[in-house]
Amino acid sequence: MSGTASTYVPKSRVAKWFESRLPLVGLVHSSFIAYPVPRNLNYFWTFGAILAAFLGIQIITGVWLAMHYEPSATGAFTSVEKIMRDVNYGWLLRYAHANGASMFFVAVYVHMFRALYYGSYKAPREVLYILGVIIYLLMMATAFLGYTLPWGQMSFWGATVITNILAAIPVVGDTIQSLLWGGYSVGNPTVNRFFSLHYLLPWMIAGVVVLHVWALHVTGQNNPTGIPVKSGKDVVPFTPYATIKDVFATVVFMILFAWFLFFMPNYLGHADNYIQANPAVTPAHIVPEWYFLPFYAILRAVPDKLGGVILMFSAVIILAFAPWLDTSRVRSCNYRPIYRQFMWVFLGVCLLLGWLGSQPPEGGYVIASQICTAYYFAHFLIVMPLCGLFETPSPLPGSILESVTGPGKQVSGAGMPAGAAAAPQVKG
């Protein structure tokens, strides 16, 4: 699906003058109003809008929190407590930022599962998908840095454990560790550097999101059938059809966010982080935030430190190779009966890894982590290629319209005009 030409026609003289010099309104109109989208999109396709909303929330609340935060080992914890107690609505800003990060990851994991389930990574959307993986990596880095800033016990020891892990990387590990520490141990320069990076990375995320949306408007959206747009009857205008669905889903998701924000603001956090960092006292059980637990379980599944680091990073990087590991000609799991079962097993394994990451690294928990880690990589390296070669897909509908109305039926009213639908043509 190539980008559609703008049909916006300014009416006033001022609007015409501005549009002839900077066609910003026309760009917005062609991208978010007249833009054609497949008519069979379900609510899985609303999580992009939810993520955009939460990126805005995180940046706005983060900027306001930064106005009152002191990035030093001696003042960080006190400044966070001052924000909670003395700053007007500081408690709301901090809880919104902390719980907003968790909601951000809930939405991104659903978004990623949708991409894997419906084959949104397959040609011609490889670059679009890889940009999404880059956004996820930047999110992980930003979230880790933000978790260290309150400088409580879990923040301090989390920073210590992760930076010590980086030292296992051959050749450059010690250099990376020294640059992050700013000295010979986690201390005052570390907090300052982590704060600077935590403030910088969200703007990088926003920049890559712009590229992500741009790539989406070049190739067009995938859909639950995975088949390309063939005519104007297969699509509807983005506004009001997709817009209303996005707004409704975002409001529902905000209700979930509000529940945590006002009724259980500390449920997803750790109690030890309300104790000021003490290098002399190690917490009984050091755990990261819940959204890192699957990768933490993979890290601990390997006795060798370097091997654990390699597997942990590989677990994320392997996602970027999905477009080439999947050999099937059919995108959507709806028409792949065998691979669909493996996808649900994969989801269960990821959830189990998350639970195992929260348990002590001993006995059966380690063995279970090793089994789940083996399946995680086998899904990409064995299941994906072999299912594509040997699986017999179910019959695909003749068009997106047919998948909605059934064979031989017609639809009226909601389709795009023939000229407007001329651009969204994709082969593959």
Image (cartoon, rainbow, N blue to C red):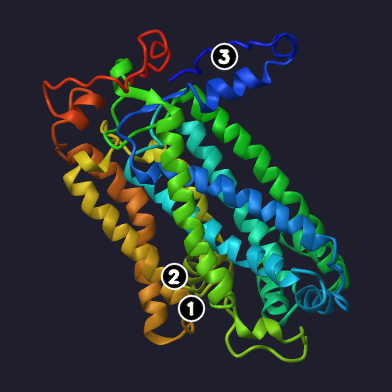
Is the residue under label 1 in contact with that under label 2 (CB below 8 Å)?
A: yes
Q: Position of residue 362 (x, y in %)?
A: 45, 86
- Judging depth in this view, the residue of 283 and 322 nearest the camera is 283
Q: For marks 3 and 2, give the CA distance.
A: 48 Å
Q: Position of residue 341 (x, y in %)?
A: 21, 54
Point out the tag, 3 or 2, that comes first from the N-terminus: 3
Q: Secondary structure at mark 2?
A: helix
The circle on residue 10 is: none
Question: Badge 1, how many Cα within 10 Å: few under 14, some, many 20+?
Answer: many
The three-letter code of the residue at mark 2 reads: Gly
Question: Badge 2, how many Cα within 10 Å: few under 14, some, many 20+?
Answer: many
The quarter of the displayed image where residue 198 is located:
bottom right
The three-letter code of the residue at mark 3 reads: Tyr
Q: For marks 3 and 1, give the CA distance.
A: 53 Å
The circle on residue 8 is: 3
The circle on residue 358 is: 1
Point out the tag, 3 or 1, that comes first from the N-terminus: 3
Residue 289 seen in the current view: no
The quarter of the displayed image where residue 209 is located:
top right
- Judging depth in this view, the residue of 4 and 154 nearest the camera is 4
Residue 393 seen in the current view: yes
| Residue at the disc numbered 2 | 354
The three-letter code of the residue at mark 1 reads: Ser
Q: For marks 2 and 1, give the CA distance.
A: 7 Å
Residue at the front extreme of this rendering: 12
The quarter of the displayed image where residue 365 is located:
bottom left
The image quadrant where one finds the C terminus is top left
Q: Secondary structure at mark 3?
A: loop
Q: Position of residue 260 (x, y in %)?
A: 53, 70
